[in-house]
Amino acid sequence: MPLTPTHRYDDIIDRPHHRSSTRPHMPLRKRAAQFMPFAALSGYDAIIMETARQTQQRVELGDDERQVLDERLRHIVEHASDHPQVSVTFFMPDPRKDGGVYVTVGDTLRRIDTVHRLLILGNGQTIALQDIVDIHEIAANR
């Protein structure tokens, strides 16, 4: 006999809800957890986003560009004790994949470490001299 809207569940609607006599009643919080969505591929979205993230390849400077950059660095080294404001564009290698990104920062020059070939800015950031592709003195703190 097919169920009609008026006869649906008429035989059980008034019966008491069954409770197990051998197992404790599950709290509502735990019952809700069993209906939460299941992510079979957890972390997959992050992997896709990482794969899609673009990086740039390091560009090698030509001889003329390298000579101009060396002259600017030499000038800044000569005035490093004045702690000039500099704008530095450098290549930051990506820790997770090939390539990296070019970054430009502006700050006070704290010092140049000639032993380790590092430019150290006022905020503590260190930049390897071989990664620098452009540098300008913004203003001197005299």
Image (cartoon, grey):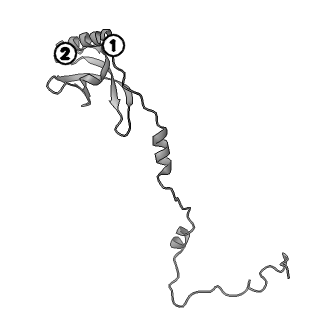
Query: Residue 115 location in percent, x, y?
Result: 14, 25
Crowding at label 2, few (<14), some or many (≥20) Cα neighbours within 10 Å?
A: some
Q: Which type of secondary structure does the marked residue at label 1 adopt?
A: loop
Q: Residue 77 carries which label?
A: 2
Q: Nearer the viewer, residue 2 or 122?
A: 2
- Find residue 83 and report its image quarter: top left
Query: What quarter of the picture does the N terminus occupy?
Result: bottom right
Query: Residue 20 location in percent, x, y?
Result: 56, 88
Crowding at label 1, few (<14), some or many (≥20) Cα neighbours within 10 Å?
A: few
Is 74 placed left or right of 6 in the picture? left
Q: Which type of secondary structure does the marked residue at label 2 adopt?
A: helix
Instruction: Work out whether residue 107 can be spotted.
Output: yes
Query: Residue 95 location in percent, x, y?
Result: 34, 38
Q: Which of marks 2 and 1 is nearer the N terminus?
A: 1
Direction left: furthest residue: 115
Indicate which label's residue lies in the foreground, 2 or 1.
Answer: 1
- Find residue 70 and report its image quarter: top left
Residue annotated with mark 1 = 62
- Find residue 72 and report its image quarter: top left
Is 41 placed above or below 69 here?
Answer: below
What amino acid type is highlighted by mark number 1?
Gly
**Callout 2 touching callout 1 (CB < 8 Å):** no
Query: Residue 130 location in percent, x, y?
Result: 26, 23
Q: Which residue is drawn at 30% across and 11% down?
A: 63
What amino acid type is highlighted by mark number 2?
Val
Query: What quarter of the picture does the C terminus occupy?
Result: top left
Is 94 placed above or below 22 here?
Answer: above
* Structural distance between the alpha carbons of marks 2 and 1: 22 Å
